[in-house]
Image (spheres, rainbow, N blue to C red):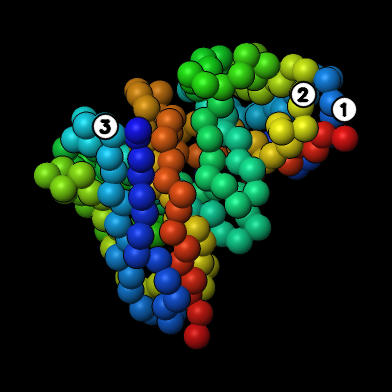
Amino acid sequence: SYELTQPPSVSVSPGQTASITCSGDKLGDKFASWYQQKPGQSPVLVIYRHTKRPSGIPERFSGSKSGNTATLTISGTQAMDEADYYCQTWDSNTLIFGGGTQLTVL
Amino acid sequence: EVQLVESGGGLVQPGGSLRLSCVVSGFTFSSYEMNWVRQAPGKGLEWVSYISSTGRTIYYADSVKGRFTLSRDNTKDSLFLQMNSLRAEDTAVYYCAREGGTSRYMDVWGKGTTVTVSS
């Protein structure tokens, strides 16, 4: 079955830039989306179609894609950004999530 | 305000059944494709099922195919997930989520309902 690969964890200091990668063959021709999930809360869409930011999502969140890798970048990371982040795409009729990345701001 | 509210979760024995509901408000339900996504305790997100806006097209993850049935009632702004032959590995928080567009992303999520399968 098709998989998306994310690093299990990423650490960043407050005010610095955090980058979370998501790799998968299908990302070459399929859009990636990114979700933020804080403990005990539902996921929130932060990026769609590789680079689009929904209304209400801070400008410090951005997305990009190069080849088969999508990247979520958080510029000027704040303590409130500490959360799990999931990438997502689709293959045939199936939606696929990456395993998730725990972002720690310390 | 756009809202998705799930209900119907609970404790059920292995082999039992549950019916989850998702009632929506704040948007034209009949215009949107919908999904169920679940999250086992301490684990990541797992897509469960998809239904088109009309209800004519439905897809399932292999892990639930043949056991779960997804349906919708556009007159009642409601989505339903009938879960039969439940297994311990179905234990999870089940989220109802709206698809935002043609790129298969989910732009609105409910708060989830918890399903526990245990004897």
Q: Is residue B91 left or right of residue A99?
A: left
Q: Are marks 1 and 2 in contact (CB under 8 Å)?
A: yes
Tell me where residue A101 sits by quadrant.
top right
**Which quarter of the rendered picture does the C terminus of chain A lie within?**
top right
Q: Is residue B70 left or right of residue B10?
A: left
Which one is in front, A39 or A96? A39
On the same chain: label 1 and label 2?
Answer: yes
Q: Which residue is mark 3?
A: B27
| Mark drawn on residue A77 | 2
Q: Residues within 10 Å of mark 3 (few under 14, many from 20)?
A: few
Which residue is outermost to the left? B75
Secondary element under disc 1, as helix, strand or loop, is: loop
Q: Is residue B83 visible?
A: no
Alpha carbons under labels 1 and 3: distance apart: 40 Å
On the same chain: label 1 and label 3?
Answer: no
Secondary element under disc 3, as helix, strand or loop, is: loop
Secondary element under disc 2, as helix, strand or loop, is: loop
Query: Is B68 above or below relative to B60?
Result: below
Look at 65% across and 58% down and name the residue there: B42
Q: Provide residue A35's location: percent of width, then percent of height.
A: 57, 34
Q: Read off the chain for label 3.
A: B
Q: Read off the chain for label 1.
A: A
Alpha carbons under labels 1 and 2: distance apart: 7 Å
Q: Is residue B64 left or right of residue A27?
A: left
Which one is in front, B2 or B22? B2
Amino acid type assigned to the residue bearing label 3 in the image: Phe
Tell me where residue A14 sits by quadrant.
top right
Q: Which residue is mark 1?
A: A13
